[in-house]
Image: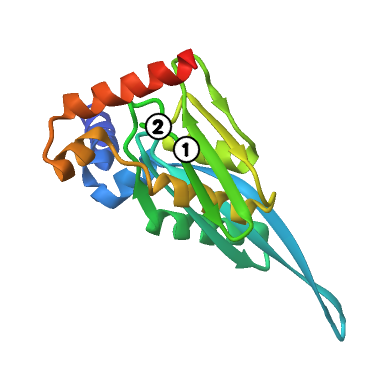
Amino acid sequence: MAEQRNEQGQGRGPRGRRDRDRSPEQREDSELTDKLVYINRVAKVVKGGRRFSFAALVVVGDGKGRVGYGSGKAREVPEAIRKATDSAKRNMIRVPLREGRTLHHDVAGRFGAGRVIMRSAPPGTGIISGGPMRAVFETMGVQDVVAKSMGSANPYNMVKATFAALQEIQSPRTVAARRSKKVGDIVQRRDDVSATTEQA
């Protein structure tokens, strides 16, 4: 019995220590969620026939305002997705969110032929946007937003235009610090403008 208890105790110990033994990078990776946005199959004609390769576009986020995108190419789909996910984790940005659920203000972004418009929304609106943009918002943790793609429907252009817009978003705290004002003044003015727009 004593030997059995010893063996069981030794078995339980390492399992209980797994979370503590993991590095901060590993713990951070476990908190991230990824979404596959698009896979493109490319065929190259060679002497023996056609050789296929795959390109993947992946979006990664932590659901708390951090998000990134990446692309990867490989002969097999899983390898292409893995490369894209690694690239997305290396290129993450932090976006300030209003009340942790929507954008602070309306913003537009452009990349190549892709043009997007994003607007903050009241609680309960949900995510109203197209496929590639929806993947970005879901992984980032946005719950209420209205977005529209006005240009190219190419997923790469849409995602890059979305990120160009997200990088333009500024929190009231940042604006107040830059203009040497109080956060309350900035927020009050924003609310007044919103009320005037709704009445019009």
| Amino acid type of the residue tagged 2 in the rendering | Leu
Residue drawn at (45%, 47%) of the image: 165
Relative placement, left or right, of 23 versus 94 is left
The spot of residue 24 in percent (x, y) is 24, 48
Measured as percent of width and height from the top left, residue 129 is found at 60, 33
Kindly identify which residue carries mark 1: 139
Q: Amino acid at mark 1?
A: Thr
Q: Residue at x 41, y 27 (%)?
A: 102
Instruction: Report which residue position mark 2 lands on.
Output: 103
Dot 1 falls on a residue whose secondary structure is helix
Q: Quadrant of the N terminus?
A: top left
Q: Is residue 14 visible?
A: no
Quadrant of the rendered structure where residue 116 is? top right
Q: Camera-side residue: 195 or 62? A: 195
Where disc 2 sits, the SS reads loop
**Residue at position x 36%, y 31% in the image:** 104
Q: Which of these two is toward me, 44 or 200?
A: 200
Q: Is residue 106 above or below residue 101?
A: below
